[in-house]
Amino acid sequence: MERILIIRKIFNEAIALIDEAGLSYWHNEADAPLGLSEMGTRLAEAEAIICLLTDRVDAQVMDAAPHLKIIANVAVGYDNIDVAAATERGIIVTNTPSVLTECTADLTFALLLATARRIVEADAYMRAGKFEGWELFQPHLGVDVFGKTLGIVGLGRIGAAVARRALLGFNMSILYTGQNPKPDAGRELEARFVGLANLLRHSDFVSIHAPLTAQTRHLLTLNEFRLMKPSAILINTARGPIIKEADLVQALEQDLIAGAGLDVYEEEPEAHPGLAALPNVVMVPHIGSATTETRRRMALMAAENVAAVLGGGRPLNPVNFTSRNP
Ligand code: GLV
């Protein structure tokens, strides 16, 4: 009987940690997507699951796993897990905060710069052998980033890391919105708390860093895009469904905003077909945390959480059974 179900291929270092803790496990090394519902007796016996953000862990899965003590997500976001259902059943849910903060902030800035300076279009142009020499009116005139205003939706760890880059590296003015003002972060980052509508009206760049919840699903629709500057660029490295993607396509087609840099999509792995047709959109396939070092740290953190809980201790990174989220 294996105590831990590792339902996708993970780094050897994480497996070694579990081995050292003397815990038995089953590891889906094939890395072929395998639904939790297809795991039968493995699930029935499991005390821990290590899963990815693409694995949906709902009440039905939990009911098929009566011995489950912990679900360790290898991701900071955990909208793939029904946390309320886990809490009701006494199951701890953990995530991987902090270790991916800087890496995701880097990718956010890469998208922001790539969209503002039309890097992808210019790269394709160069490869096609179209460059005929420097001209004042080159085909890839972009927009300045330095000194502009950045609006951050969700000044959590990643939002703050993006704001820090914007302030220290690019002398940008920072606006932010979220559930509550964050006076300390706001002071350090010289960031001003405003309502969403004001943030959208006044920002040259809007970057989303909120978790996906019932409140943030479709936070940005055509109504919100209408508030934005026609010169504004939208960046999303958080979760796709925060934006109503069909409305974003419409907003870009109608020049309500100037461009978008996207790492996440409403129906992953699909992206709205209209996006690929637009030259002012830069799209990457959910790679915010995708460096080898960061992904290794995430896998290790999930394994540490499982080892702690199955060893009778407290999880390191719980998202439920905390004073914040009982
Ligand atoms: C990635 O999107 C994560 O939530 O870690």
Image: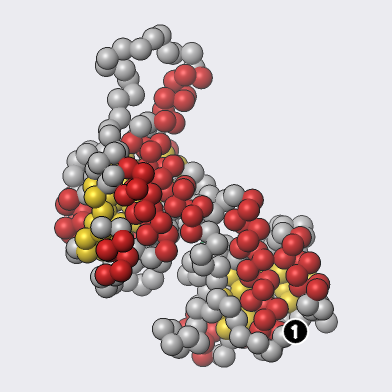
Residue 95 location, quadrant: bottom right
CB of mark 1 near ligand 1 (< 8 Å) = no
Who's the residue at 66% across and 58% down the image?
296
Q: Nearer the viewer, residue 39 or 2?
A: 2
User: At which x and y percent is residue 285?
Assistant: 52, 47
- Which residue is rendered at x = 63% and y = 61% of the image? 297
Q: Position of residue 53 (x, y in %)?
A: 56, 64
Q: Amino acid at mark 1?
A: Glu
- 107, above or below 209, in the image: above
The residue under the point 83% across, 82% down is 1
Image position, residue 28 (x, y; %): 75, 64
The image shows residue 297, relative to residue 2, as above or below, that is above
Disc 1: which residue: 45
On the rendered structure, is 292 left or right of 108?
A: right
Residue 256 seen in this snapshot: no
Q: Quadrant of residue 70?
A: bottom right
Left or right: where 296 falls relative to 253: right
Secondary structure beneath label 1: helix
| Up-down relation of residue 139 to residue 13 (above or below) | above
The image shows residue 160 at horizontal and vertical percentages of 37, 59
Q: Residues within 10 Å of mark 1 (few under 14, many from 20)?
A: some
Closest to the observer, 125 or 33: 125
Q: Is residue 21 above or below residue 77?
A: below
Q: Is residue 296 visible?
A: yes
At x 72%, y 85%, the residue is 311
Instruction: Give 31 or 273, whichever is nearer the viewer.
Output: 31
Horizontal side of 98 relative to 273 (left or right) equals right
Q: Among all residues in the image, which is located at the extreme top?
A: 132
